[in-house]
Image (tube, rainbow, N blue to C red):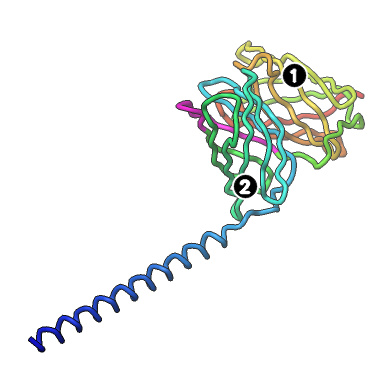
Amino acid sequence: MKEYFINKKEIFILLTSITIFSVSLFSCSTIQEKDLSDSQHVNTNFDGKYNVTFLSQGYFRAITDFEIENGILDGAIVNTSNQTFFIKGSVLENGQFSFKSIESSVGAPITASGNIKQDGIIEGHYKVGNRDGKYFGFKYSDSENNTSQYDGTYNISFYLGDQQTASTEIVIKSGVFQKDIQTITSETFPVQGRILDQGTLILTTSIGDHSTGIAASGSIDSNRKVSGTFFTHQGEKGSFKGERISE
């Protein structure tokens, strides 16, 4: 009997040691995972104001401005159906970007993820309810003020790859413009734009006709040369360039 009692005690001690070791190992693993998570802190290098466009199923769903401050986004999106999504998100060290709605005027929440590149272009995907879509945006200057110093008439051409898709004249007055642009396939789409200080150009399809058009961002340099990037309502990425032809 005594021998059996001793063996049972030894087994109990062994099981206790294994349990303590397992708990220690789990705690160590948890600490390592926590440290790894902590190392992915938000990145303030991408702070600034952005113009962002949301599209799905071939339609522009929303065009909005929001600001990232201290690596944190806290803003709102109002879509073409006048539905509001209050969103919150963050930017990590590698430019990975994500946000979700913390409140909305509809039952379906919005979730999104993507990336902000060093040139300030945002690209990603989002989901509202069962509908998937894409979003893209452009960082612009820290000032929201339009400037008239770049006013004049500009000849601007748009390209998808090496193919020119449209060429038009745009008249900028008091830092803003509106224009119906016709493509080489005779499609017409209205656009509106603004020129901010530092020569930053933001151009989007008119929100009233969101079934076609573009969203674009670029710049006008000191020689009044224009260049930039645009997206179509199908999410295709293109480029545009031009110059001022008269004041």
Which element carries disc 2, helix, strand or loop?
Answer: strand
- Write down the residue under mark 1: 168
| Drawn side of residue 176 relative to residue 229, left or right | right
Where does the image place residue 150, in percent across and percent down from the top left?
88, 31
Residue placed most toward the observer, 82 or 118: 82
Question: Which is in the foreground here, disc 2 or disc 1?
Answer: 2
Residue at point 62%, 45% (across, down): 116
Where does the image place residue 177, in percent across and percent down from the top left?
81, 21
Which element carries disc 1, helix, strand or loop?
Answer: strand
Question: Looking at the image, can residue 161 be seen?
Answer: no
Check if residue 112 falls in the magenta segment. Answer: no
Location of residue 112 (image quadrant): top right
- Write down the residue under mark 2: 90
Check if residue 128 falls in the magenta segment. Answer: yes
Location of residue 191 (image quadrant): top right
Name which residue type carries label 2. Answer: Ser
| Drawn side of residue 1 relative to residue 93, left or right | left
Span shown in magenta: 127-138
Q: Main secondary structure of the magenta part?
A: strand
Name which residue type carries label 1. Answer: Thr
Q: Residues within 10 Å of mark 1 (few under 14, many from 20)?
A: some
Q: State the residue lying farthest toward the left.
A: 1
| Drawn side of residue 165 relative to residue 19, left or right | right
Question: Looking at the image, can residue 190 be seen?
Answer: yes
Where does the image place residue 132, in percent across and percent down from the top left?
49, 29
Residue at point 52%, 65% (across, down): 35
Residue at point 78%, 36% (across, down): 219
Q: What is the number of the mark on residue 247?
A: none
Label 2 and label 1: CA atoms lie apart by 39 Å
Q: Is residue 94 above or below residue 55?
A: below
Q: Quadrant of the N terminus?
A: bottom left
